[in-house]
Amino acid sequence: MEEQLGWSLPVSAMPDWVRGLPDENDNYQLETDEFGFPSHLAQDGWEIDYRDWEQFEGMWLPRRLIMNYDEVRITLVVNQWQASEE
């Protein structure tokens, strides 16, 4: 993907990022809001802004996040969280 587009999506970090967590295997900067929720995450060249949260099975999870990398902007909106069957 990086050769074709000039940027790469860090697939290994995505499961953490969409849950409002940094990838613990890489350096990061995390800012929180007045309630302690992550509001901004900078990691691996990406800037992630968390805009909305919802409670799901006792956990607060992001509902909307905006990911920026250079000129690339990705907006992710989670309509419904679902627990995995692990």
Image (spheres, rainbow, N blue to C red):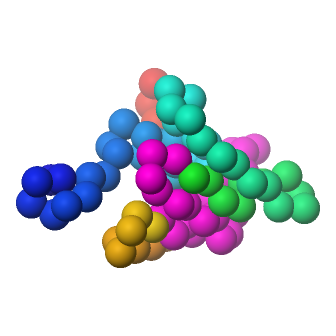
Q: Is residue 56 magenta?
A: yes
> Which span is picked out in magenta?
43-67
Point 90% across, 62% down: residue: 34
Give x and y (percent) for residue 18.
51, 51
Q: Residue furthest left?
A: 4
From the viewer's perspective, tell me whether residue 59 is left or right of residue 79: right
Where does the C terminus fall, quadrant-wise?
top left
- State the image coordinates of residue 70 (x, y, percent, origin top left): 39, 68
- Residue in the foreground of this view, choosing between 74 and 18: 74
* Residue at 61% over, 53% down: 41
What kind of secondary structure does the magenta stretch mostly adopt?
A: strand
As displayed, is residue 37 above or below residue 68?
Answer: above
Q: In front: 83, or 12? A: 12
Residue at the (60%, 41%) spot, across then down: 28
Q: Let me know if residue 24 appears in the view.
A: yes
| Residue 48 sits above or below residue 83 on the image | below
Q: 28 and 48: which one is in front?
A: 28
- Residue at x 65%, y 71% (from the top left corner): 51
Report x, y in % for residue 74. Answer: 40, 70
Q: Is residue 24 left or right of residue 38?
A: left
Quarter of the image for residue 63 reads bottom right
Relative horizontal placement of residue 77, taking residue 53 as reference (left or right): left
Looking at the picture, how far across and down is residue 53, in whole percent?
69, 63
In the rendered image, residue 24 lying in the magenta stretch gets the answer no
Number of marks in the rendered image: 0
Res. 78 visible in picture: no
